[in-house]
Image (spheres, rainbow, N blue to C red):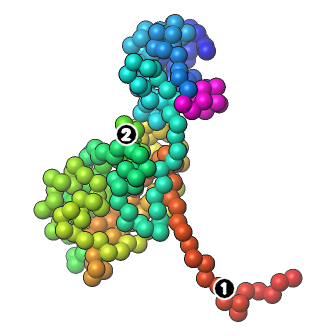
C-alpha cells in the first residue's frame, strides 16, 4: 500500500484510498469472499483517520466491490452479473432481482408533467404532437448498489391515477398492479459511455460503458402505455436470449468459393 504522503493531492484522500483498494481487488490481490484489513489497520497503512477509511469503504460499497458484515469485517463481493431476458422483455426488473438473490429498491429522481417530444409522441402514438405526458427518472438498486437508471414516459391518462405508486415502485410491476396489463413490447439494446451525470447516479467511472435497454410496451390492443430506456451498469448486468434459428433461404446466399 502507498503511504498517505504519496496519495494524490489532486483528489480527496478517501477517493484516492478507495481507488487503490479497487485496483487491488480487480488485480486479484483481494479475492472474492476474502476479508480486507480492518478499518483500524487500513488507517494505519494509509496514515489516515478511521473517518477517512469509512468514506473510502463507502465508495467501494456503492460500486458493489465490497460488503460489510457487522462484527466480522469488510469482505470482497462474490459477484455474478444479474441477467435479464431479451426473450421475455416484460420480465419485471424487481422479480428478476429477487429470483437471483437480490433485494431491489427504487429512488425516484423526477416525476413531472410535461409536453411530449416528437419522438415520444410517435412512440406512444399520441393523437397530438404536444400532448401532455409524465416523465419519470428513477434509480434501481440491487441491495445497496445503484445498478440502473430508468427514464420513462407515460401517457397522462395512464400515469396520473398511479402517480404515488409509480414514484415508489418498479415500472412494469406497478403498472400491472394498477390494472394496466402489458401484452407485448418492442425492445432494442445498445451501449453508451457514462456521462458525468450518469457516473454520479450509478457510482461508476466517467466513460464506463452502460447497457441501454430501449422499450415500448403495449396493451392487448397494441396501444402503447409506456416507453423509455433503462441504462444499466455493464459490470453488474447482462441481457440474455434464447433464439430459434430459422433455416436460411438459399436463394439469397451467394455461391461458395
Question: Is residue 3 shown left or right of residue 73?
Answer: right
Q: Could you tell me which quadrant the C terminus lies in?
A: bottom right
The answer to which of 5 and 164 lies nearer the viewer is: 164
Residue drawn at x 73%, y 86% as measured from the top left: 253
Instruction: Please state the extent of the stretch shown in magenta in the rendering.
Output: 25-33
Q: Is residue 181 left or right of residue 145?
A: left
What's the mark number on residue 143?
2
Q: Check disc 1 and report the residue beneath it.
A: 248
Q: Residue 58 bears which disc, if any? A: none
In this view, 20 is above or below 203 = above
One can see residue 135 in this view: no
What secondary structure is marked by label 1?
loop
Where residue 197 sits in the image (x, y, percent)? 40, 42
Residue 223 painted magenta: no
Residue 105 position, x and y percent, is 30, 45
Is 28 colored magenta in this rendering?
yes
Residue 44 position in % (x across, y down): 52, 6
Q: Which residue lies furthest to the bottom in this view?
A: 251
Q: CA gap, disc 1 to disc 2?
A: 45 Å
Q: Residue furthest right?
A: 257
Q: Residue at the spot x=57%, y=77% of the render?
A: 244
Residue at coordinates 60% horizontally, 30% vertically from top-left?
A: 31
Q: Residues within 10 Å of mark 2 (few under 14, many from 20)?
A: some
Nearer to us of marks 1 and 2 is 2
Q: Earlier in the sequence, mark 1 or mark 2?
A: 2
Q: Position of residue 6 (x, y in %)?
A: 59, 11
Can residue 157 be seen from the camera position used here? yes
Q: Is 68 rendered above or below residue 39?
A: below
Report the predominant secondary structure element of the magenta stretch. loop
Count of marks overlaid on the render: 2
Given the current orientation, which residue lies at the most extreme left position?
A: 161
Amino acid at each position: 500500500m502507498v503511504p498517505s504522503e504519496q496519495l494524490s493531492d489532486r483528489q480527496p484522500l478517501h477517493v484516492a484510498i478507495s481507488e487503490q483498494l479497487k485496483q487491488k481487488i480487480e488485480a486479484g490481490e483481494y479475492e472474492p469472499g476474502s476479508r480486507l484489513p480492518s478499518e483500524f489497520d487500513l488507517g494505519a497503512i494509509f496514515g489516515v483517520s478511521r473517518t477517512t477509511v469509512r468514506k473510502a469503504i463507502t465508495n467501494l460499497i456503492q460500486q458493489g466491490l465490497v460488503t460489510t458484515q457487522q462484527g466480522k469485517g469488510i469482505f470482497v463481493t462474490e459477484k455474478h452479473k444479474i441477467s435479464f431476458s431479451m426473450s421475455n422483455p416484460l420480465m419485471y426488473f424487481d422479480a428478476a432481482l429477487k429470483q437471483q438473490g437480490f433485494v431491489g429498491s427504487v429512488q425516484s429522481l423526477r416525476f413531472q408533467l410535461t409536453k411530449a417530444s416528437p419522438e415520444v409522441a410517435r412512440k406512444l402514438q399520441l393523437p397530438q404532437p404536444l400532448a401532455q405526458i409524465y416523465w419519470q427518472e428513477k434509480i434501481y438498486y440491487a441491495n445497496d448498489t445503484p445498478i440502473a437508471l430508468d427514464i420513462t414516459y407515460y401517457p397522462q391518462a395512464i400515469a396520473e391515477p398511479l402517480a404515488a405508486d409509480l414514484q415508489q415502485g418498479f415500472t412494469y410491476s406497478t403498472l400491472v398492479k394498477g390494472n394496466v396489463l402489458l401484452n407485448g413490447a418492442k425492445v432494442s439494446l445498445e451501449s453508451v459511455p457514462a456521462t458525468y451525470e450518469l457516473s454520479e447516479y450509478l457510482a461508476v467511472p466517467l466513460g464506463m460503458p452502460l447497457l441501454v435497454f430501449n422499450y415500448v410496451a403495449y396493451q392487448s390492443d397494441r396501444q402503447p402505455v409506456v416507453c423509455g430506456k433503462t441504462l444499466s451498469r455493464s459490470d453488474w448486468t447482462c441481457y440474455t436470449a434464447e433464439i430459434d434459428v430459422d433455416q436460411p433461404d438459399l436463394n439469397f446466399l451467394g455461391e461458395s468459393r
